[in-house]
């Protein structure tokens, strides 16, 4: 019999069974009568022996169906009818689920895009980021010499590739454009094993001087600038004045590695660069050889260092190699912070489930008659449980669908909360609702349905007929409050954990807003200016151009003061040098790693960075004058602890005619600047006058400096125009890029922080609201059940205040318990926030106390409403009704 | 044995079906007659509950081990009689063999002399 015949045959099965059981009874009655029993007695005994006929028919029928599906369908239809009959209840439950599941799904889309989504190349877990531990002890970029050593000797990698960020001026059309790309070794492409979609990638041959003028375009750049036409292959692009031949275009997936680069050109290591082992500028990626772990690879690199140590110049000594998964390197701390958010949103979902569970419980109580009746009519216990679960399932599916739909719409809005967040969190721009997300949403729906359905289902199915039919409402009232009290306690605990997290993040955000950055950025405009190589080969020429630019822009009537610098707070383009006080050996063990700023005289005035001691630079510090430097307070402290740094000399940056490091006189000390953002400690800064910048630094900077302009008024709009004009006057082929006010740069640094903060605030408020509704619901239910008792008490002389006290005392009991549990959990979980908060400990007592206080106030309010309603109960009315 | 074994709890799964098949092998019977026949062959040791028998019969119909048809009983009543099919006989003999081995195994273990 096929399924359809079976369905059609259902009626026959029922009828046959009914007839069959009838015949069974007849035969038995006949027999009993034959044995001498009166007919009526025989009939009754036969029936008793046979048992519940309907149930037998149902069970017989069950055999024939694809029972699961059909039951489920029937249950769903039944549940639907029940829910439609209670629109208020249904709406609240569906909206609660929609909030919980929708928010969870929305955050999951971000978690998926940033953390879970596999990188779009072959075996992403085998690709690693490789760095070296140089002086500072943290991961740093790799020198070309070290990279070549590794490539030659390392057996633990099947491929090692290196890249260095470059930015070039491209003149296509009228306005020159600044593009970011990377200079790479040919092996860079083989590490990722992604071939070009058009043409080819770079060959090893092209990593040699004279052959390097070729470029591979990204899909993004190809479409944006070259219209996506294949004919671009073989054409020539002028980059920084040099002609580059387009040899290939990479597929779109290569754009999704998380970096900003838009093209690839060959990197060329000069024999001198390799031999010097200096200039830690290369970011190295590798593909691990089969069976090799990251630890083994790191050990391998360290051994190679050890072997090479004798051959290395003293000041380039590297301590060891560091190997991290590429994914971890790209995603970085965002991973942890997103997972914290995800945890928070899961808590919200948990609270939502708690609320719906309570609603179902309350409904289960109202429906206890119905349930008892159905049980007595032969509905089996599993069947009843299934029916209750179906109800929560229908609610969860409806809410989930609504929620996921809302998430689909809201995700662009979510990202719009902080457009900078897209820049700050890698791969966040790839956030979309995809198959994985839908699968997750489905799992969330199923879990929510089970969580909310199972307790009321089990509870309701345990009801027995007698208690329930003999006016259950009263007898059940006090008896089984533990379950609902447990729900309240659980919700309170969860919401405290949630609010504690949000609270600590708020404190951290307030701290970051209040931190003195060490400079005054109001009405300061910054922009990056890059001079091409062609025409600016001479350092003196570069210097003259920048000085000329500063002079010109300073003359603008709207400009108060202006300067250029190689290193501006929260702006790309930082370089570090080892500094050693005079008298100590110029050896990495004595290095203070200083952040280099090559500046014009008015840099400190522009940013209002205070002079602490000594003097600022002046025009007297010309090229041939004695070499001078200015230290930040931190740098001075590190180089000359407990000494006056002014007047001391520091070896750094370049060699004198005798080959020994050149000594520079410290002429001044300035205030510290939190260059990496308010959340980071100020680095050890040192500044050199632009006239005395070592020649090689211009290639480090790629002849790119940041112009900083302080306007006379708050508005910076006019400054942008002034700046562009000045640059045009100096050289019309030079683009102005990276234009931003200091305020914007500050905001961008805090973007991820703010993104997390806004979301946590949102989640915290939803959680608080939901739990308040939950507490209110439980107490309202409690009051409703005990209204007889309360009315009697009042009739016997209890004052309204007594009643309110009784109700609130009762209602707050689970809240206290939940608060204790929640506090314990919040303290235990606080460390998960460690990487997201600044200026406050994750288990900040102020926050914890505030959170508990807020919650208790909300809980008392949620209690008072129903409690006051209880005092208005009228005994006479109740008894009459 | 003081109390009777009830088919609902005291038998292992599938036992009822085997007894029904074995009983039907002799001649087709209707439900109540089956209850009686099994009770009689077990010398009243086994009490077949209708609550178990009728769903079991439906299962066996579905499996194709028995056929059912409406017929007239010895006393002239219209009853639904079940008869065993070839498939049912195969199942019975297979299960008998399996059961035989199982009981033999259990017997051997239980017969072990205590040290």
Image (cartoon, rainbow, N blue to C red):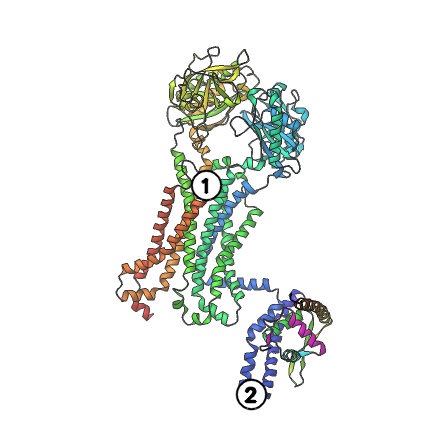
* Residue bearing the label numbered 1: A833
State the separation of the CA atoms marked 2 and 1: 81 Å
How many numbered badges does the structure rendering display?
A: 2
Image quarter for residue A299? top right
Q: Is residue A572 above or below residue A447?
A: above
Residue segment shown in magenta: B2-27
| Residue A325, above or below A176 | below
Residue B93 seen in the current view: yes
Question: What chain does badge 1 belong to?
Answer: A
Residue A853 in picture, x, y percent from top left: 35, 47
Q: Nearer the viewer, residue B99 or A151?
A: B99
Residue A661 percent location from the top left of the image: 52, 15
Residues at discs 2 and 1 both on one chain: yes
Does residue A555 appear in this view?
no
Membership of A872 in magenta stretch: no
The mark that comes first in sequence, 2 or 1, is 2
List x then y, in percent, for residue A688.
46, 18
Q: Position of residue A496 (x, y in %)?
A: 41, 48
Secondary structure beneath dot 2 equals: loop
Specify whether A567 is left or right of A534.
left
Question: Depth check: B1 or A519 in front?
Answer: B1
- Identify which residue is drawn at 39% across, 68% down: A475
The mark found on residue A812 in the picture is none
Categorize mark 2 by other alpha carbons within 10 Å: few (<14), some (14-19), many (20+).
Answer: some
Name the residue tied to disc 2.
Answer: A37
């Amino acid at each position: 019999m096929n399924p359809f015949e079976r369905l059609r045959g259902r009626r026959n099965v029922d009828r046959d069974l009914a007839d069959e059981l009838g015949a069974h009874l007849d035969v038995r009655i006949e027999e009993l009568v034959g044995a001498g029993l009166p007919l009526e007695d025989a009939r009754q005994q036969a029936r008793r022996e046979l048992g519940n006929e309907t149930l037998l028919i149902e069970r017989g029928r069950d055999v024939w169906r694809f029972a699961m599906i059909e039951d489920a369908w029937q249950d769903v239809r039944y549940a639907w009818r029940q829910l439609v009959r209670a629109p208020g209840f249904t709406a609240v439950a569906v909206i609660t689920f929609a909030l919980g599941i929708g928010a969870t799904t929305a955050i999951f889309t971000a978690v998926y895009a940033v953390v879970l989504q596999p990188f779009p190349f072959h075996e992403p877990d085998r690709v690693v980021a490789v760095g070296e531990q140089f002086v500072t002890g943290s991961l740093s970029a790799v020198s070309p010499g070290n990279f070549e050593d590794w490539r030659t000797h390392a057996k633990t990698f099947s491929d090692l590739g290196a890249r260095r960020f470059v930015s070039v001026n491209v003149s296509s059309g009228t306005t020159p454009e600044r593009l970011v790309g990377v200079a790479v070794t040919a092996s860079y492409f083989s590490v990722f094993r992604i071939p070009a979609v058009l043409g080819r990638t770079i060959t090893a041959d092209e990593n040699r001087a004279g052959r390097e003028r070729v470029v591979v375009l990204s899909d993004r750049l190809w479409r944006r600038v070259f219209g996506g036409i294949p004919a671009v292959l073989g054409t020539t692009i002028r980059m920084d004045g040099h002609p580059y031949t387009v040899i290939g275009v990479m597929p779109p997936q290569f754009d999704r590695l998380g970096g900003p680069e838009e093209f690839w050109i060959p990197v060329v290591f000069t024999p001198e660069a390799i031999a010097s082992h200096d200039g830690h500028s290369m970011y190295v990626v590798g593909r691990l050889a089969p069976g090799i772990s990251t630890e083994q690879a790191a050990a391998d690199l360290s051994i190679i260092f050890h072997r090479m140590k004798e051959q290395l110049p003293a000041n380039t000594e590297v301590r060891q190699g560091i190997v991290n998964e590429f994914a971890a390197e790209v995603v970085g701390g965002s991973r942890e912070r997103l997972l914290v958010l995800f945890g928070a949103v899961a808590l919200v979902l948990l609270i939502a489930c708690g609320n719906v569970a309570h609603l179902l419980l309350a409904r289960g109580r109202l429906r206890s008659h119905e349930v008892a009746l159905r049980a007595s009519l032969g509905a089996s216990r599993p069947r009843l449980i299934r029916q209750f679960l179906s109800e929560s399932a229908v609610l969860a599916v409806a809410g989930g669908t609504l929620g996921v739909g809302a998430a689909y719409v809201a995700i662009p809005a979510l990202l719009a909360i902080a457009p900078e967040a897209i820049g700050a969190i890698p791969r966040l721009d790839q956030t979309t609702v995809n198959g994985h997300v839908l699968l997750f949403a489905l799992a969330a729906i199923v879990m929510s349905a089970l969580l909310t359905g199972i307790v009321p289902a089990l509870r309701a199915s345990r009801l027995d007929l007698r208690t329930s039919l003999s006016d259950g409402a009263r007898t059940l009232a006090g008896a089984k409050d533990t379950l609902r009290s447990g729900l309240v306690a659980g919700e309170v605990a969860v919401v405290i954990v949630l609010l504690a997290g949000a609270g600590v993040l708020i404190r951290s955000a307030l701290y970051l807003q209040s931190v003195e950055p060490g400079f005054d950025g109001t009405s300061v405009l910054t922009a990056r200016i890059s001079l091409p190589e062609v025409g600016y080969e001479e350092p003196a020429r570069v210097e003259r151009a920048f000085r000329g630019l500063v002079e010109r822009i300073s003359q603008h009537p709207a400009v108060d003061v202006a300067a250029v610098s190689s290193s501006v707070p929260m702006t790309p383009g930082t370089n570090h040098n080892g500094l050693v006080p005079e008298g100590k050996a110029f050896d990495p063990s004595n290095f203070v790693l200083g952040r280099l700023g090559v500046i014009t005289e008015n840099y400190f005035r522009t940013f209002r960075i205070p002079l602490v001691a000594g003097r600022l630079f002046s025009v007297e510090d010309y090229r041939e004058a004695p070499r001078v430097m200015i230290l930040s307070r931190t740098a001075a402290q590190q180089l000359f602890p407990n000494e006056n740094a002014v007047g001391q000399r520091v070896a750094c940056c370049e060699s004198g005619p005798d080959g020994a490091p050149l000594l520079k006189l410290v002429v001044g000390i300035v205030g510290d600047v939190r260059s990496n953002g308010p959340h980071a400690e100020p680095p050890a800064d040192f500044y050199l006058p632009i006239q005395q910048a070592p020649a090689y630094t211009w290639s480090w900077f790629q002849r790119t400096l940041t112009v900083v302009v302080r306007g006379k008024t708050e508005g910076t709009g006019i400054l942008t125009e002034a700046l562009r004009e000045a640059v045009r006057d100096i050289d019309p082929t030079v683009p102005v890029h990276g234009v931003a006010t200091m305020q914007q740069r500050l905001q961008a640094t805090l973007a991820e922080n703010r993104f997390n903060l806004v979301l946590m605030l949102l989640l915290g408020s939803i959680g608080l609201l939901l739990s308040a509704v939950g507490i209110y619901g439980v107490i309202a239910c409690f009051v409703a059940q005990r209204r007889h008792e309360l009315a009697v008490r009042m009739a016997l002389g209890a004052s309204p205040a007594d009643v309110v006290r009784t109700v609130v005392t009762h209602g707050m009991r689970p809240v206290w318990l939940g608060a204790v549990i929640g506090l314990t959990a919040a303290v235990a979980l606080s460390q998960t926030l460690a990487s997201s908060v600044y200026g406050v400990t994750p288990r900040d007592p102020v926050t914890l106390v505030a959170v508990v206080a807020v919650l208790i106030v909300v809980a008392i309010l949620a209690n008072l409403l129903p409690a006051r309603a209880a005092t208005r109960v009228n005994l006479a009315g109740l008894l009459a009704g | 044995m003081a109390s009777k074994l009830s088919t609902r709890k005291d038998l292992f799964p599938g036992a009822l079906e085997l007894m029904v098949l074995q009983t039907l092998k002799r001649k087709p019977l209707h439900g109540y007659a089956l209850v009686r026949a099994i009770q009689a062959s077990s010398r009243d040791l086994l009490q077949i509950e209708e609550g178990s028998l009728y769903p079991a019969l439906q299962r066996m119909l579905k499996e194709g081990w028995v056929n059912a048809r409406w017929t007239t009983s010895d006393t002239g009543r219209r009853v639904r009689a079940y008869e065993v099919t070839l498939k049912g006989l195969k199942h019975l003999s297979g299960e008998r063999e399996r059961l035989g081995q199982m009981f033999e195994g259990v017997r051997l273990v239980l017969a072990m002399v205590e040290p």
